[in-house]
């Protein structure tokens, strides 16, 4: 039997341990000893641990020589193993020549560059710093010089523009290096290993980058040189720069995540002064932008200050952040424990800047991390929080925040805001009164406010911040950063979970929300609870379910013979969406639009109606508690002509979802076209016809006919704007309607027995009085109401009934948006004329028919020009059913699967193979 080659492994780290494992599989080899570094504290090098598992003798030397002379006791131990070949996979120590030449076949050594280029300890860094187009490694025969011995083999790869020291090591130098060490040993064993003398041409010897003074970046360089230097030290140890603060102090920082940036300079940046930089550097929403001496730009995504790694864009915010400045001893102990958990999962040493995902972690690792952290620290961590804080230091800060704040920590942050306390409904409710931008409540830039009036008593409830175009711009930029940043890290299923968290929070706070809605908009409390808030919660739950079911199609197309073609579509979010809503169902209008928008993966800002923005602000608070990342949802109360217009005009807003009146809708559509041709969907006014045939179920027709007009005080876009009642039952129908109206309870909307509350605001109330006056002037018969409710403070409008209305009258054509029933007669023998009359309007939102004759009902459904048709029912909307109008009632749908498409774009991908 042939003698086995006796190998001594001299080195350290995972790389050496992997080489050991690889060689253990060779039957012609015996590993006779492993020589490595001493333990650091109680931590043994992984090479020693691996060797021990395989019963290989382990020797740990702090050093091999003193004053250039080999230590005799070390030499003796080395000789005791009788190695015929030394293998040095990764060795940071000086090995004496007595050892290098002490094995019969010599010593082979791994070096991470293509020798003779980049001799020295920091070869990979220099490959990047020097902008080499090719990287690689060499295995050479060690001699008495530094990386000068004859070459055994080399391997190479192209340097990609996305490479950093980490990526090039992980994707190529490590895995291919381990394999190549096996190949080299095999070549030695078979006697085929060459010894190629290194050429001297092209040889370099580069300084060691573990010396701090060498890590300082020279900013008097081109953008490309700055970029290469940063990535050459990314992620360990990081390039050093010095910030010059305005107060004369200096701060040393380290830079990570560099890339060339051709879109510079930035318009929204704030200048940061860096020592040695004669050009400018800006903090902007995408990071830290540095101008090189050549006028080109390099952008830095992450900065390490002290022990914390932050997003560079957060620099000024972090400077003001008082929350975590230093850690207690106990927290530092927990930091080590946490680092241990990360290390065990990632199987590598953990630094402040270690990125969980960049280190190769996958979804199972997220689950493991979450479960281990929950168990170790007793915190209710959720998977999405790992995606939101993937860098170790960020994650640790998140943990500390939780440990300090208890249940207000994770995704339940302590939120500071100015508020007014609403005392109503036996409750005291804190309602934020500031704008909600980028996850924080902030004052309006111009310090303007809106007075919010309680329609029940006409008194000012509170003042809330009133957004200007500048505030809108801030919110859009926050939404833009979130769309391209944190929101992208969240998977669709996690997005759905966030939406469900939000829905649960809304459910838990539903009495508070309904109370606010009732006081702010005049909605009857019970209706606010069931519809305004109830249907909002349902919308969030319904659309949460869609998040992970948004998919494209595979489409058969003509193949390009002789090849095949695969064509498929992807449904992608559009980007930043602006939402503008009216005052009739403030929270519900917000939810109908925003739930679809968010489910589709967009970020957004909403401008609620200026008269009642309070539930939107309370909602904003809940989004933080639900765990939504900053910038994904922004809420800006303000005026339509100012803030609303700025949303429609903004160049970074790619989609506008609008609900409101037809005239404003037309104006908005022009703005969308003029600004950046943004996609828009318009849910506009209506004048919906309701037909009541004589063969109807009269009880049902009266009940639904009443609610078709008086539901939510008539402030309902699908309210029946015109009732056509067959002449045979006309008088009977009116008699029964009037009977019910006389017993309708009108009063405080918070009172549980109230059926009819105040109109939303004064201008609307006055408009209704004017509407009735025109009806009377045109000759319609006012049979009930048409005036203020006597002896009651507040905008209480008496439910009203007009009869004898002819088609040409103003009140037959225009929307009142109030509790005004407009009744006309028709003859049941003339259905064609009836349909013509029903369709003789520029609106086409909803419609209804009451008849027991299914043929008549379906005939009506066929011929009516309206987006919604109710048969023997009215106002029966559902979050799963698409909702939206025809003609000048707008286009695009809220609710149902169709609403998702309003917030998605289709990309078609074609692949030839
Ligand atoms: P509106 O006057 O059209 O206002 C709607 C929203 O647009 C409000 O937030 C308003 O701000 C804003 N706005 C006004 N001018 C603007 C501009 N130049 N640029 C951007 N935004 C602007 O309607 P409304 O009186 O609030 O609501 C009643 C109307 O909404 C009715 O016609 C009703 O039928 C319709 N509506 C339709 C649906 C539907 O689904 N089809 C649902 C509900 C209501 P301000 O708060 O400052 O006015």
Image (cartoon, rainbow, N blue to C red):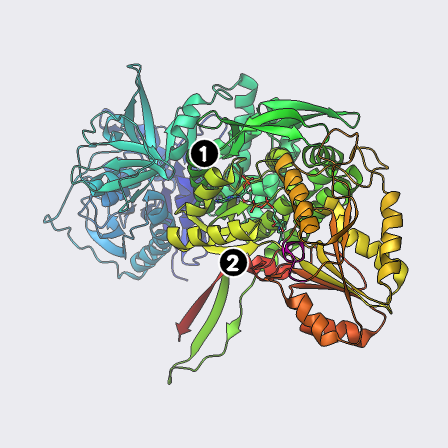
Residue farthest bottom in this picture: 562
Work out whether residue 357 can be spotted: yes
Span highlighted in magenta in the image: 807-814
Residue at image position (38%, 50%) is: 675
**Relative to 661, is 424 above or below?**
above
Horizontal and vertical percent position of residue 623: 60, 37
Which element carries disc 1, helix, strand or loop?
Answer: loop
The C terminus: image quadrant: bottom left
Q: Which residue bears the numbered disc 1?
A: 468
In this rendering, position of residue 323 left or right of residue 223: right
Q: Nearer the viewer, mark 2 or mark 1?
A: 1
Q: Earlier in the sequence, mark 2 or mark 1?
A: 1
Q: Is residue 566 magenta?
A: no
Residue at image position (45%, 68%) is: 908
The N terminus: image quadrant: bottom left
Mark seen at residue 543:
none
Residue sitting nearer the eye, 78 or 854: 854
Q: Quadrant of residue 354?
A: top left
Mark 2 vs 1: CB contact within 8 A? no
Q: Which residue bears the numbered disc 2?
A: 904
Which element carries disc 2, helix, strand or loop?
Answer: strand
Work out whether residue 625 can be spotted: no
Horizontal and vertical percent position of residue 90: 34, 42
**Relative to 551, is 475 above or below?**
above
In this rendering, position of residue 565 left or right of residue 66: right
Residue sitting nearer the eye, 131 or 427: 427
In this rendering, position of residue 696 left or right of residue 169: right
């Amino acid at each position: 039997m042939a003698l086995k080659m006796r190998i001594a492994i001299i080195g350290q780290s995972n790389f050496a341990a992997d080489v050991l494992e690889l060689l253990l599989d060779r039957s012609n080899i015996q590993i006779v000893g492993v020589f490595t570094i001493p333990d650091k504290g109680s931590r043994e090098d992984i090479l020693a641990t691996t060797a021990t598992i395989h019963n290989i003798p382990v020797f740990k030397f702090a050093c091999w020589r003193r004053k250039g002379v080999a230590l005799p006791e070390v030499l003796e131990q080395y000789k005791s193993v009788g190695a015929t070949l030394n293998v040095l996979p990764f060795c940071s120590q000086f090995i004496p020549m007595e050892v290098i030449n002490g094995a019969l076949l010599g010593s082979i050594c791994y070096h991470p560059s293509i020798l003779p280029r980049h001799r020295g300890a920091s070869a990979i860094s220099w490959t990047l710093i020097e902008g080499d187009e090719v990287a690689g490694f060499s295995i050479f025969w060690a001699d008495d010089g530094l990386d000068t011995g004859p070459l055994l083999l080399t391997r190479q790869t192209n340097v990609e523009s996305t490479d950093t020291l980490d990526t090039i090591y992980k994707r190529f130098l490590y895995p291919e290096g381990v394999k190549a060490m096996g190949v080299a040993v095999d070549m030695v064993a078979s006697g085929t290993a060459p010894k190629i003398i290194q050429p001297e041409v092209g040889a370099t010897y580069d300084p060691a980058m573990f010396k701090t003074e060498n890590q300082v970046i020279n900013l008097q360089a081109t953008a490309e040189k700055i970029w290469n230097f940063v990535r050459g030290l990314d992620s360990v140890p990081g390039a050093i720069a010095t910030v010059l603060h305005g107060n004369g102090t200096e701060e040393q920082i380290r830079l990570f995540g560099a890339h060339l940036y051709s879109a510079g300079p930035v318009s929204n940046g704030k200048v940061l002064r860096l020592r040695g930089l004669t050009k400018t550097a800006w903090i902007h929403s995408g990071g830290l932008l540095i101008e090189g001496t050549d006028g080109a730009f390099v952008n830095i995504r992450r900065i390490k200050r002290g022990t914390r790694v932050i997003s560079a864009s957060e620099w000024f915010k972090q400077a003001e952040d008082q929350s975590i400045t230093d850690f207690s001893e106990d927290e530092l102990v927990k930091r080590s424990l946490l680092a241990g958990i990360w290390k065990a999962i990632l199987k590598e040493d953990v630094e402040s800047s270690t990125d969980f995902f960049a280190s190769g972690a996958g979804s199972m690792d997220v689950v493991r991390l979450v479960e281990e952290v929950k168990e170790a620290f007793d915190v209710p961590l959720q998977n999405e929080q790992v995606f939101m804080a993937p860098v170790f230091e960020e994650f640790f800060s998140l943990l500390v925040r939780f440990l300090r704040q208890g249940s207000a920590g994770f995704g339940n942050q302590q939120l500071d805001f100015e508020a007014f306390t609403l005392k109503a409904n036996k409750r005291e409710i804190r309602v934020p009164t500031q704008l909600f931008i980028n996850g924080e409540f902030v004052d309006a830039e111009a310090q303007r406010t809106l007075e919010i009036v309680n329609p029940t008593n006409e008194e000012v409830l509170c003042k809330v911040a009133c957004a200007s175009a500048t505030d809108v711009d801030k919110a859009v930029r926050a939404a833009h950063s979130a769309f391209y940043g944190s929101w992208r890290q969240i998977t669709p299923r996690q997005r759905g979970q966030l939406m469900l968290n939000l829905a649960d929070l809304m459910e838990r706070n539903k009495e508070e929300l309904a109370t606010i809605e009732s006081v702010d908009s005049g909605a009857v409390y019970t209706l606010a609870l069931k519809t305004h808030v109830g249907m909002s919660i349902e919308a969030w739950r319904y659309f949460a379910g869609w998040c992970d079911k948004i998919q494209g199609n595979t489409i058969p197309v003509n193949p390009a013979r002789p090849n095949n073609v695969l064509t498929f579509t992807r449904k992608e979010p559009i980007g930043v969406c602006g939402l503008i809503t009216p005052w009739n169902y403030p929270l519900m209008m917000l939810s109908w639009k925003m739930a679809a928008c968010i489910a589709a993966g967009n970020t957004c800002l909403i401008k609620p109606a200026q008269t009642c923005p309070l539930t939107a602000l309370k909602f904003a608070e809940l989004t933080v508690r639900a765990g939504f990342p900053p910038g994904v949802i922004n809420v800006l109360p303000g005026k339509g002509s100012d803030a609303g217009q700025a949303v429609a005009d903004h160049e970074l807003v790619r989609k506008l979802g609008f609900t409101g009146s037809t005239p404003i809708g037309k104006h908005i559509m022009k703005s969308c076209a003029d600004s950046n041709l943004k996609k828009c969907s318009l849910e506009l006014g209506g004048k919906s016809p309701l037909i009541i045939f004589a063969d109807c179920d009269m009880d049902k027709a009266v009940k639904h006919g009443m609610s078709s007009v008086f539901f939510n005080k008539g402030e309902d876009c699908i309210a029946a704007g015109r009732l056509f009642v067959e002449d045979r039952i006309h008088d009977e129908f009116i008699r029964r309607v009037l009977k019910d109206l006389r017993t309708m309870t009108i009063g405080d909307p918070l009172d549980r027995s109230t059926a009819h509350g105040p109109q939303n605001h004064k201008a609307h109330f006055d408009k209704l009085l004017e509407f009735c006056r025109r009806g009377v002037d045109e000759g319609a018969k006012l049979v009930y109401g048409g005036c203020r409710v006597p002896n009651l403070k507040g905008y209480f409008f008496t439910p009203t009934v007009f009869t004898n209305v002819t088609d040409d009258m103003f009140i037959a054509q225009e929307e009142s948006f109030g509790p005004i029933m407009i009744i006309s007669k028709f003859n049941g023998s003339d259905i064609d004329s009836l349909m013509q009359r029903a369709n003789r309007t520029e609106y086409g939102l909803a419609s209804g028919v009451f008849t027991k004759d299914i043929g008549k009902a379906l005939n009506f459904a066929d011929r009516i020009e309206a987006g919604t048709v109710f048969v023997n029912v009215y106002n029966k909307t559902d979050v799963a059913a698409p909702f939206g109008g025809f003609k000048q009632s707008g286009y695009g749908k809220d609710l149902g699967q169709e609403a998702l498409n309003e917030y998605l774009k289709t990309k078609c991908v074609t692949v030839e193979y």
